[in-house]
Amino acid sequence: MEREESPILKPATLDERRKYYREEWDVKEIPEFIRESVLKREFGFDHMGRGPNDRYRVFRSADLLRKFLRYRAPFAAYSSVAFYDKPRRRDGWIKSELVFDVDAKDIPLRMCGCEGVCEICLNQAREIVCSLMDTLKGDLGLNDIHVVYSGRGYHIRVLDESVMKMDSDVRAQIVKYIIGAEVPHNEYAEEGVTYNLEHFSIPFGYPHVFTLRAKYSILHLSEAIQMEGVNQKLVKDAIKHQELIKNDEWGIFRNKIGPIRYQRLMNGIASLNMGLVDAKVSIDLKRILRLPSSLHSMVSMKSMEVKNIENFDPFEDAVPRFVYERKD
């Protein structure tokens, strides 16, 4: 099937949802990290396409969840990132996954002009996820990390015990670190220094992280981009000297731009980087996320755990069978 003629990204009908959950979907496709903790999580559902208003659902087993999904065929299904003693009331909070939400339609410096999502911006989101994963593993030493394709982007879900009991303030600091949301100060580069966030030590590789994020932003700049505190003349000059950044010639680039204007550009990029993820999702300890294996009915694609992010192609791997049976 040619992609330009693809019926993908159209909303799923109720009949298609029923077909998906009754003929194609398998409860075993729900990741093990969710299936093994069903009793501790809140579940929510959207039955009409108006948002998850059926909340605080609890299932005693994955099999009961299976029966519910097959019977109701919801427009969307969600589960909490939090673990509770009493999930029906969201009471007795135990811990929460650390989550990073990269939505293709909201990322800054999109390389496409689509109004929703398309192959280009979804691939751009995948590249961002790969970069963030490198930072989480390399800089922060986190290992129990799962990537989920949400249908219109990606969720990075961290289940390391070292982070799951952190409060929102600490999570906000981690978000700023991995996305490069603050221009590093000189003292950050002091060798061997660590910064302790409530017993969670972050090594100061941050200047390197910020450099990677800034390089990505500069190489993807266009004259249409708007940055806080940065005029269009500065944007054009940055684009003019992109080749220097491509070759990692930062000193020459800084001299070409001018030291003061360079600082303005870096401040603008730091602000721009805040759009790489939805920070509200990361700091919300009681957030619900789309349930992996469920159908994203708005675009007729499967939300699913991604085992190999480098080779994942949603237009090949996340398309339900019923899509290929559509007549138009």
Image (cartoon, grey):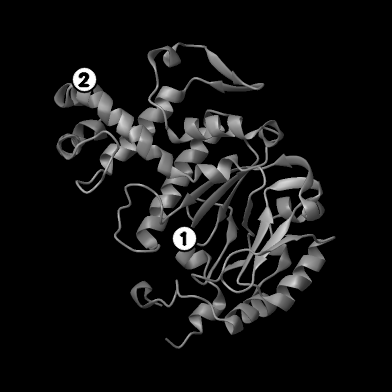
Q: Residues within 10 Å of mark 1 (few under 14, many from 20)?
A: some
Q: In the shown orientation, is residue 248 left or right of residue 85?
A: left
Q: CA distance from mark 1 to mark 2?
A: 42 Å
Q: Are marks 1 and 2 in contact (CB under 8 Å)?
A: no
Residue 155 percent across, percent down from the top left: 55, 50
Is residue 309 in view? yes
Circle 2 sits on which residue? 259
Circle 1 sits on which residue? 313
Q: Work out whether 86 lies above or below 266.
A: below
Q: Find the residue positioned furthest to the bottom.
A: 327
Residue 129 percent across, percent down from the top left: 48, 45
Q: Work out whether 73 lies above or below 271.
A: below
Q: In the shown orientation, is residue 184 left or right of residue 282?
A: left
Q: In which quadrant will I find the N terminus?
A: bottom left
Q: Residue at x 27, y 33 (%)?
A: 229
| Dot 2 amino acid type | Pro
Is residue 249 in view? no
| Dot 1 amino acid type | Asp
Q: In which quadrant will I find the C terminus?
A: bottom left
Q: Residue at x 43, y 43 (%)?
A: 276
